[in-house]
Amino acid sequence: MDEATSALDTKNEAKMYKQCHKLNITCFSVGHRLSLLEHHNKILEFDGNSNYEFRDI
């Protein structure tokens, strides 16, 4: 989801991700909020030079 929760406050963002987890839905998110890290277990980071790192949070 690309900035799917940008219009939500963090409380409703958490509700949405908890519901996805409850329903066993895999989510891929693109965003700038650090609060997204609470709802994921992996991160893909790009360094701006065509390099990336996929790691556990």
Image (spheres, rainbow, N blue to C red):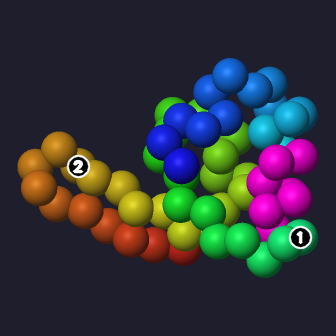
Left or right, 9 with respect to 50, comes to right
The stretch of residues the image draws in magenta is 15-21
Q: Which residue is mark 2?
A: 47
Rounded to the nearest angstrom, the CA distance separating label 2 from label 1 is 33 Å
Callout 1: few (<14), some (14-19), or many (20+) C-alpha neighbours within 10 Å? few
Which label was assigned to residue 22? 1
Residue at position x 55%, y 69% from top? 42
Amino acid type, mark 1: Lys
User: Which quadrant of the view contains residue 19?
Assistant: bottom right
Query: Type of residue at label 2?
Result: Asp
Q: Main secondary structure of the magenta part?
A: helix
Q: Relative to the observer, which residue lies in front, 1 or 30?
A: 1
- The label on residue 38 is none
Q: Nearer the viewer, mark 2 or mark 1?
A: 1
In the displayed structure, 53 sits above or below 2; it is: below
Taking 18 as reference, is 46 left or right?
left
